[in-house]
Amino acid sequence: MNPQRKKRLFIVLAIIAGVGIAVSLALSALQQNINLFYTPTQIANGDAPEDTRIRAGGLVEVGSVKRSSETLDTDFVVTDGVKSVTIRYHGILPDLFREGQGIVAMGKLNASGVLIADEVLAKHDENYMPPEVMQALEQSGMLQQHEAANAEKKTYQTERAQ
């Protein structure tokens, strides 16, 4: 094999190795940033992994929000209409967070089945609900109840304004 051919073969192999390393690093970084969505039913059934960052969502149960008087800790229960999961959050909740509304929380599940959230997202208007939460509520049949309650609330607000 002549020296010119050896040099080209070496360059091609170096390029292939470089691309392989770049692809493996990119896939590794993406895998670490994946936050899989779990419904309260899946979490209660033990399908969600412990000590792995996940997303969970549903409707905040009415009467379940418990705020600490001394710290920014808040515990609340989220349901998909079938089962419920307790979420513990330390921080200031979004302005749109309230009971009976859809939320998505991101955090890690502890051994006792409580999601220790580091981020809580609330829907931004009356019509929007995160797609995962909407799908979970549709499967449980609770979406129609939620929409009926929102329609009733809108009617009441319209009547009050007039």
Image: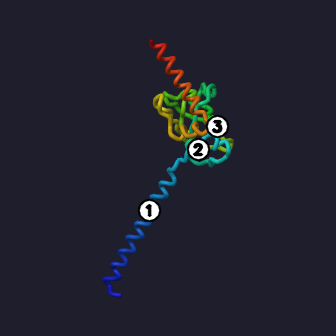
Q: Answer with the quarter of the image where residue 145 lies.
A: top right
Q: Of the numbered discs in the image, which one, if any, rests on residue 82?
A: none
Residue in the picture at 67% in, 46% down: 46
Q: Secondary structure at mark 2?
A: strand
Q: Secondary structure at mark 3?
A: strand
What is the x, y in percent for residue 24?
47, 62
Q: Secondary structure at mark 1?
A: helix
Q: Which residue is mark 1?
A: 23
Judge depth for marks 1 and 2 and give the one in front: 2
Q: Using the image, determine if residue 104 lies above or below residue 161.
A: below
Nearest to N terminus: mark 3 or mark 1 = 1
What is the x, y in percent for residue 106?
54, 41
What is the x, y in percent for residue 15?
37, 70
Looking at the image, which residue sits at the far left? 4
Residue in the picture at 49% in, 28% down: 96
Q: Is residue 38 left or right of residue 123?
A: right
Q: Amino acid at mark 2?
A: Tyr
Residue in the picture at 49% in, 32% down: 123
Nearest to N terminus: mark 1 or mark 2 = 1
Q: Which residue is mark 2?
A: 38
CA separation, marks 1 and 2? 28 Å
Q: In which quadrant is the C terminus drawn?
A: top left
Q: Amino acid at mark 3?
A: Val
What is the x, y in percent for residue 16?
40, 70
Q: In which quadrant is the N terminus drawn?
A: bottom left
Q: Amino acid at mark 1?
A: Val
Residue in the picture at 46% in, 60% down: 25
Q: Of the numbered discs in the image, which one, if any, rests on residue 85?
A: 3
